[in-house]
Image (cartoon, rainbow, N blue to C red):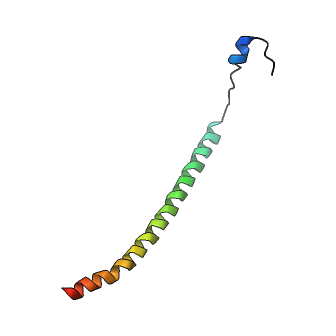
C-alpha cells in the first residue's frame, strides 16, 4: 500500500462504526441467552455427577449403619 505521506503510513484514517441501539440490544440479549444456555448445560452435568456420587456412597452408608 502506498501512502501519500510518512505521517499517513503510521496514523491511518479513523474508522467509525455506527450501530443502532436495537441491534446492540439484540446482540446483548443473544449473548445473555447463550450464557444462560451454557449455565443450564453445566448445571445438568453437575446434577448427573452428584447423582453418580450419591449412588457410589449409598452402599458405604448402609455398611456403616450395619457395623454400628
Seen at 54% across and 58% down, the residue is 37
Residue 5 pos. (x, y %) = 76, 11
Would you say 33 lies left or right of 67 here?
right
Residue lying furthest right in this view?
Answer: 2
Quick one: 45 or 26, which is closer to the camera? Answer: 45
In the rendered image of this protein, does residue 2 appear above or below residue 29? above
Residue 28 pos. (x, y %) = 57, 45
Residue 8 pos. (x, y %) = 72, 15
Seen at 73% across and 12% down, the residue is 6
Quick one: 44 or 27, which is closer to the camera? Answer: 44
Quarter in which the C terminus is drawn: bottom left
Seen at 81% across and 18% down, the residue is 2
Residue 7 pos. (x, y %) = 70, 12
Would you say 60 lies left or right of 11 here?
left
Would you say 46 lies left or right of 57 here?
right
Would you say 24 lies left or right of 61 here?
right
In the rendered image of this protein, does residue 44 appear above or below residue 33? below
Residue lying furthest left in this view?
Answer: 68
Residue lying furthest bottom in this view?
Answer: 66
Seen at 28% across and 85% down, the residue is 62
Quarter in which the N terminus is drawn: top right
Quick one: 17 or 48, which is closer to the camera? Answer: 48
Amino acid at each position: 500500500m502506498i501512502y501519500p505521506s510518512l505521517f499517513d503510513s503510521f496514523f491511518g484514517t479513523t474508522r467509525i462504526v455506527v450501530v443502532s441501539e436495537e441491534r446492540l440490544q439484540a446482540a446483548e440479549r443473544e449473548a445473555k441467552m447463550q450464557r444462560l444456555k451454557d449455565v443450564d448445560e453445566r448445571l445438568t452435568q453437575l446434577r448427573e455427577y452428584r447423582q453418580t456420587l450419591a449412588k457410589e456412597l449409598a452402599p458405604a452408608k448402609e455398611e456403616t449403619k450395619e457395623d454400628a
